[in-house]
Amino acid sequence: MSAHLVAAGDLVDDDPALALRHALAAKRRGARLPLVREAVAETAYAAEDFAVALTEYRALRRLSGDSAYLPVMADCERALGRPEEALRLVREAKLVDMTQRSKVELVIIEAGAREDLGQAKEGMRVLRTFLGRLSKDIPHEAHARLAYAYAAMLLRHDQPDEAREWFMIADELDTARELDAADQIELLDGVDFEFDFDEEDEDSDEDQDSEQAEDTADEGQLAAEAQQVDDVPEPTSATEAERTDVSEAQPQDVTPAQESDRPDVAPESVSDQTAETSSDSAAAEPGDNGVADE
């Protein structure tokens, strides 16, 4: 079991699906251990298997009584297409004490659930209000995630100028470079990423034209060869007559060779050949034919 847990922890970032398989293998050996259930929940969440993740996080909350799982449970509900359930868990989480990081995640999930329900303006208001009340001790990475979520929602709802400002804030706060805020800024600034692709397309067009020219040349050569074959004259009647004369000609008498023309080898009589063959067969020993006795 412990080997599967170690493997799950090592693989969760690079191959979350395989990490989940290891965690489930560990669960079959220790389903009642909170550590095992947490490994399954985290790897399932990373692998985007939100149904399994939600089941495991619910079990963890029952086992531990810890409300810290409420934000991620709400996110799973939203990912499963149940924004109302996500908002219910958000309201429940607001009644208990939460860390700054958890509060940030709750606000992001609440805003996203509002957007899912067609209440984008309310979602942006929730984010904007929380951003205006941030305490100074909030971790930079949590602040960066909040700013990025607000910028992304602004961009989705046709406010690119304001979105760019918040992407800039997110990029400055994201010292670990976990977000793609810099890429979003470049896209908003109109950086042309298609130049290389256009050049490749031109090369591809040139190659295609060259191949078409070669195909045309080959077709012309084949047509010329076919014409040459067509130009070969048909056999004349005289030629056919000659073939007929040859086929109907009687074979000439072949004169037997004179004795002086024959090879100077005396033929053996049939009895001599039979005697020699019998002598050779009698002399052969078992195994001489190349097959060893077993």
Image: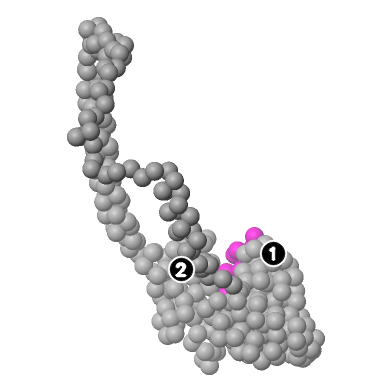
Q: Quadrant of the N terminus?
A: bottom right
Specify the segment rendered in magenta.
118-127
Where disc 2 sits, the SS reads helix
| The one of 235 and 240 positioned closer to us in this rendering | 240
Mark 2 neighbour class, 10 Å CA radius: few under 14, some 14 to 19, many 20 or more? many
Residue 248 placement (x, y as % from top left) = 31, 11
Report if residue 70 is visible in the image.
no
The single residue placed furthest to the left in the displayed view is: 260
The chief SS type of the magenta part is: helix
Q: Amino acid at mark 2?
A: Ala
Identify which amino acid the numbered label 1 is placed on: Gly
**Residue for point 47% across, 64% down:** 283
Q: Element at badge 1?
A: loop
Where 274 sits versus 143, above or below? above
Foreground disc of the pair 2, 1: 1
Residues tagged 2 and 1 counted as in contact (Cβ below 8 A)? no
Image spot of residue 251 (x, y percent): 29, 17
Residue 183 higher or lower than 59, as above or below: above
Is 125 within the magenta?
A: yes
Q: Please check the rendered image and state whether residue 70 is part of the magenta-colored stretch, yes or no.
A: no
Of residues 213 and 59, the one drawn nearer to the viewer in this rendering:
213
**Color scheme of the displayed model:** one colour
**Residue 66 in the figure: left or right of residue 272:** right
The C terminus - image quarter: bottom right
Give 160 or 5, whichever is nearer the viewer.
5
Where residue 64 sits: x, y (%)? Answer: 77, 91
How far apart are the two marked residues, 2 and 1, measured between alpha carbons? Answer: 26 Å
Residue at 22% across, 7% down? 238
Q: Position of residue 170 (x, y in %)?
A: 45, 78
Return the residue at label 1.
81
Residue under pointer 2: 163
Q: Residue at x 50, y 85 (%)?
A: 141
